[in-house]
Image (cartoon, rainbow, N blue to C red):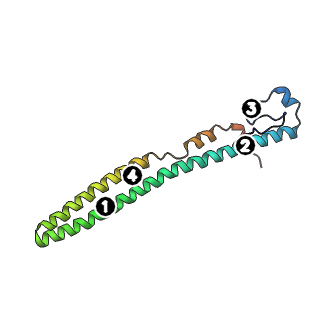
Amino acid sequence: MTVPTQDPGYQTPGAPHEADEVRGSSIGQLMSQVTGDLSTLMRQEVELAKAEIRQEGKKAGKAAGLYGGAGFGGYMVALFVSVAVWQFLDNVMDSGLAALIVAVVWAVIAAVLYSKAKKNAEQIRGLKQTNDSVQRIPDALKPNPEGVTR
């Protein structure tokens, strides 16, 4: 693995600059350094946001699947309870009670899936790291609408 070489005068983005370095630099060089630093900062923020979106998207997808399973379980409960009540009232025989037992089993399955979906949904926290990181950008880089004259 090779390490890329850098210009000897190049300073890593975000590294503090000595006062003599700044005094000895032209406005063009300083603007180039600021632009490079901002470009690096923005690329890093975008990569952080992408990583967080992927991570949180997986959690949201899992929760959505579990909610779907709970919905299907609820549908099955309604179906089997309806069949059970119908058969029970029609025959008052063991087949109706069997259908009711199946409906209870589906109710338990739906309740378990719902509770898991709710637990997974509560773990979704948004883009917390990106938000925290963006808030640490120096105030000098943020627009100041009070000081703008038109």
Query: Few, some or many C-alpha atoms within 10 Å of disc 1 (few <14, some 14-19, many ≥20)?
Result: many
Tell me which numbered mark, 4 or 1, is placed earlier along the sequence. 1
- Residue 94 in percent (x, y) is at 12, 66
Image x and y of residue 93, in percent: 11, 68
Q: Which residue is mark 2?
A: 40
Q: Is residue 24 left or right of residue 77?
A: right
Q: Residue at x 35, y 61 (%)?
A: 71
**First in residue order: circle 3 vs circle 1:** 3
Q: Which mark is residue 117?
A: 4
Quickly name the residue at label 1. Answer: 74
Q: Which residue is mark 3?
A: 15
Q: Amino acid at mark 1?
A: Gly
Amino acid beneath label 4:
Ala
Would you identify the image quadrant in which residue 106 lies? bottom left
Please indicate whether residue 29 sits to the left or right of residue 1 in the image: right
- Between the residue at mark 4 and the residue at mark 1, the CA separation in whole angstroms equals 14 Å
Sooner in the amino-acid sequence: mark 2 or mark 3: 3
**Amino acid at circle 2:** Thr
Q: Secondary structure at mark 2?
A: helix
For marks 3 and 4, the one nearer the N-term is 3
Q: If you read the primary sequence from the N terminus, does the residue marked by circle 2 or circle 1 appear first?
A: 2
Q: Position of residue 19 (x, y in %)?
A: 82, 26
* Inter-mark Cα distance, 3 to 4: 45 Å
